[in-house]
Amino acid sequence: MGISQNDGTMEGWLYIIGSNRLGLQYSRKRYFILKDNCLRSFKAKPSSDSEEPVRSAVIDSCIRVTDNGKASIHRKGFFIFTLYNTSNHNDQLKLGASSPEEAAKWMRSLKDAALKECPDTANNFVACSKGRWPSFIRGGSRRAERKISVDWTFGSLTHTESMTSDVIAPSPWKIFGCQNGLRLFKEAKDWDSRGRHWDDHPAIMAIGLVDGTSEAIFRTLLSLGPSRSEWDFCFYRGSVVEHLDGHTDIVHQKLYSDWLPWGMQRRDLLVRRYWRREDDGTYVILYHSVSHKKCPPKRGYVRACLKSGGYVITPVNQGKQSLVRHMLAIDWKFWKLYLRPSSARSITIRMLERVAALRELFGAKTGNCSSEFSSRDLIRRYQHPGEVRKIEEGLLVEDEVEKPEGRASLKGLHDAADEFFDVPEPTEYDQFENEWSADLSMEQHSMNIQQPKLSSAAVLVKKLHELRVQKKGYMDLQEVSREDNISCSYGATLQKDPSCALPCSWGSADPSSFLIRGPSYLQDRQKIKAKNTLMQLVGVDWLRSDKREDDLGSRYGGIVQKYAERGGSEFFFIVNIQVPGTTMYTLAFYYMLKTPLEENPLLHNFVNGDDSYRNSRFKLIPYISKGSWIVKQSVGKKACLVGQALEVNYFRGKNYLEVGIDVGSSTVARGVVNLVLGYLNNLVIEMAFLIQANTEEELPEVLLGTCRINHLDASKSVLVKP
């Protein structure tokens, strides 16, 4: 429909999404203008600035914007987002755009407007000149209400000041080859607290440059129709089992067998597919295997387990081209012991070569490819190295035959302007295979030394448990065994380990790993490394209860009250992160300031300011330093204003300020945390807290404190007894 942005004004066509009394959704096309914290709507594009709007609303600091993803109304697709008032969740407005780019621009402009100072914050969000905005749930039946979108990305809902990373960290990827014009990477191995590699199926990534816009590539990757056969030589048939929300589906995919090693039975995948769009035009598609009652295992297929995978499509060269990253970590469910682990990795690498097919497809559309061919022709060009001459299901087992590599180079099909070329070097590939085989044998040897022998019954139970967890992809917190502690000393329930070698422990993260606003940020938008922290982390709580645990600083016997009884000048800043559920989990960080509060004007203003000021300033930088790729991709490494997305409660005491973050107040944040909790035992989580500096006098920013949580264990949380 087209939108325009100039002089701080955003305008264009949108659709108001509502429901009638029968619960049926409808859409009404309106022309919207956002200017100076005021959102106005018209039935037609206004001819003058003095024209009276049909409705108008004030966008103040109480307004939040959520992304509801894609929806179809009367066979027309919309990308929907919702505005709601935090003081009254029934006070909301649902809007639809014709493309994800338009929806993203409107959401960004509305979020920016909400952060600005509003002259009259008492006005109701839906107050209008001629009537109220149409209510999304007015008169609708409960069955007709759409499910709330669950986003896996914490940074997507919160206000991020830039799309670049705010964490300095080494890349977890190591290149091991270049094949069919794609760079191939393996993920650096993560080790659990016992020193044992926790994932037997390492993540592998292929990167290629595609001549197409990120939106066009995104739509191509999401399609499960006949057009997919033009590039995906692995794909046979696919269907959506269940549509969860505008961003999430349960998808079943059947794979062809002719690209697999000879004799290998056909595979299928049942995955949870999630997508999102970043503000810079990057699209992220994430997959992981799930089980679903509507799609049991199919006869004639072996269901592989996709531990984590997906695509990241980043626009480059003014959006004319896109850098496509495709990552997979798959358990192909081999059950014959004679099959080498290298064979499974070769199949995964083969599947990643779909990026090359995607590149050729878009190259043909733009005229950069000399010939067109279908995916069935393309598969014959990609010869698979070291095919396995085994029959999985039959009784006959043929001897493995070493065949010479007959990989057909695609160099002749590439344009001279391609960034990467096919460089098949068998010696490097063999070295890579030998390296992994050696690592695997050493790992198995160490496991044999460290693990005591179990009885056959114990081994069977252990295998069944691992199989069940593997099918789910994660472990529910409610299923973890618990150790009830008798007493609770607030501020000391989680053990300290500066080296972070012990499981379920805490330490301080390196401040120089985080980027903060520099002294000239308002002019050059440059960030600098943090040098130190203003406060010292002196304690961490890991609690569970059947209710919210607020105001921990006032608890008798805790670290805060002990210092208060001494009459010292120490001031405490407490960050209390509350995770909802059948059991409420609380992760609280206690930071201590030894210098007078008045010596830090920004912190002093924050401690003594009102909640609106605090919500516009309190900032968090998350970072998963060790863990699964899908968790890292979900959490991100970008600074965000927590108070702009979540309900935050503040508790002011004589010698402390406690910031209570209710993760359950947002379905988006709750989705992220639930994903993190599923992989909790395998994660090392780092965070930094700070107060955002908005003026030259407040710059440069200073970190309040950092933390590092090592392999947190739900079973070791301390029970808070009434």
Image (tube, rainbow, N blue to C red):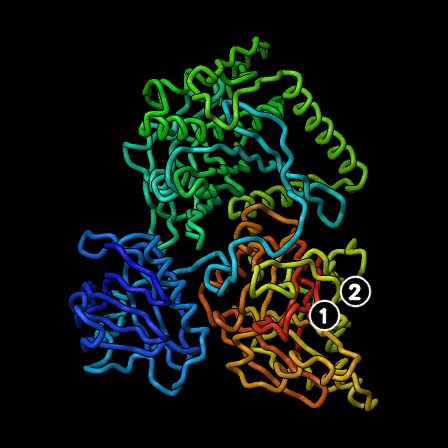
**Residue at 44% of width from left, 58% of height from top?**
151
Horizontal arrangement in the rendering, residue 118 relative to residue 125 (left or right): right
Mark 2 to mark 1 CA distance (whole Å): 8 Å
Q: Position of residue 700 (x, y in %)?
A: 66, 68
User: Is there a contact, CB below 8 Å, between mark 2 and mark 1?
Assistant: yes
* Residue 427 rendering spot, x and y as whole percentages: 66, 16
The residue singled out by tag 1 in the image is 540
| x 56%, y 60%: residue | 525
User: Can residue 145 be seen by looking at this rendering?
Assistant: yes
Q: Is 439 left or right of 17, judged from the image as shown? A: right
Position of residue 552 in the picture relative to residue 2 (left or right): right
At label 2, the amino acid type is Lys
Residue 281 locus on image (x, y percent): 42, 49
Task: Please name whichever residue, 551 or 306, is drawn nearer the observer in this view of the structure.
Answer: 551
How many other residues sit within 10 Å of disc 1, few (<14), some (14-19) or many (≥20)? many
Circle 1: residue type: Val
Tell me which residue sits at (77%, 71%) in the image: 536
Q: Quadrant of the N terminus?
A: bottom left
| Residue placed under numbered mark 2 in the picture | 496
Residue 107, picture quadrant: bottom left
